[in-house]
Amino acid sequence: MSTGTPITKNIIHVGKKYVPIEDGSKVYFHFQTWKLGKDRILIDDSRKMGKKEPMVLVIGHKFKLECWETIIKMMAIGEVASFHVKKELVYSYPFVSKTLRELDQEQRIKHSCTMTLHTEGIGYADLDGLINQPCDLEFVIELLKVENSSEYEKELWQMSTEEKFNMIPELKKKGNMLYGQKLFDEAEKAYTEALSILEQMMLRERKCDNEWITLNKIKIPILLNYAQCKLIKEEYYSVIEHCNTILQHDKDNEKALYRRAKAHTGAWNPDAAEEDFRRLKKLNPAMTAICDKELEYLKKLRHEKTEQDRDALKNLFGTEIAAS
């Protein structure tokens, strides 16, 4: 066993079968991390740290601890092996360990500039020790499962721009189907995912460019559907905000005007609601009957509100007179 070898492997338990692990493969494994030196000291055990779940790694996506990808590619499914890794390859381990330890905790708000790192460390004495005095580490790995890229649903960060773009109509269709089934929370979630992809893509373009304009045209009907979900859930100010966004780019969008007017009614902005309904009548005379009905309802609400306010004032002054 050469001391100059950066990674040295010893098999503890032979695996069931070897499968090629290519870029894009998702691997699941448990690990222990041991500090090597005068004494062999256990630092981490995935079965006891964080969420106590197996580590999941997507090969080829530049994980902070690159040696783990190298290690995993040496293994068969079901194999347990020990890997002695030179300190030059594990300088980043303390930071990886900190992240994994805190996965089941509320996010810590802590300034992490270089000066803070030198004066306060990263919050764990054993990891601070590794930063100040780097040493070789031993990883005991049990490889549980390997899925190639076609066997699991990719997360957004793994997808190419083309793959993300192709997801948008599918998510819109899914949202529409869920909306039709009156599963409004689920529909909203699908629309949100589609909007998130579009907004990420739009950030890369300038507003005056054709690419941005094309993406925005795709975005508007999805945002309208999203606003409708919010309207049903009576989240009126959210509806107003999103309809404002639509009307900035499509000032005569009838659906946005109608949904904003309904939201203004719900939020009790009667003047704004009335303005939107009257504008909608002018834009599309076919909507006159619907808008007139809504305006009549507004008139009724105004009258009820006036009566309520008058009664409240009577009660207030009556109480004051009685008290005097």
Image (cartoon, rainbow, N blue to C red):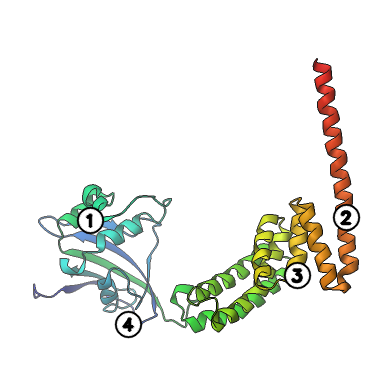
Residue with the mark numbered 4:
18
Q: Earlier in the sequence, mark 2 or mark 4?
A: 4
Q: Is 192 in front, or is 105?
A: 192
Quadrant housing the N terminus = bottom left
Separation of disc 3 and disc 1 at Cα?
Answer: 62 Å
Q: Callout 3 environment at 10 Å: few (<14), some (14 to 19), or many (20+)?
A: some
Residue lying furthest top in this view? 324
Residue 90's x, y, as percent? 21, 66
Q: Nearer the viewer, mark 4 or mark 1?
A: 1
Q: Is residue 181 visible?
A: no
Three-letter residue code for mark 1: Leu
Q: Nearer the viewer, mark 3 or mark 4?
A: 3
Circle 3: element type:
helix
Q: Is 75 in front, or is 304?
A: 304
Circle 4: element type:
loop
Q: Callout 2 environment at 10 Å: few (<14), some (14 to 19), or many (20+)?
A: few
Q: Nearer the viewer, mark 1 or mark 2?
A: 2
Residue 282's x, y, as percent? 84, 70
Circle 1: element type:
strand
Residue 23's x, y, as percent? 36, 82
Separation of disc 1 and disc 2 at Cα?
Answer: 71 Å
Residue with the mark numbered 2:
297
Separation of disc 3 and disc 2 at Cα?
Answer: 19 Å
Q: Is residue 99 visible?
A: yes
CB atoms of marks 2 and 4 within 8 Å: no
- The residue drawn where x is 15% and y is 64% is 136
Q: Does residue 253 appear left or right of residue 101 in this picture?
A: right
Three-letter residue code for mark 3: Lys
Which quadrant holds residue 323?
Answer: top right
Which quadrant holds residue 113?
Answer: bottom left
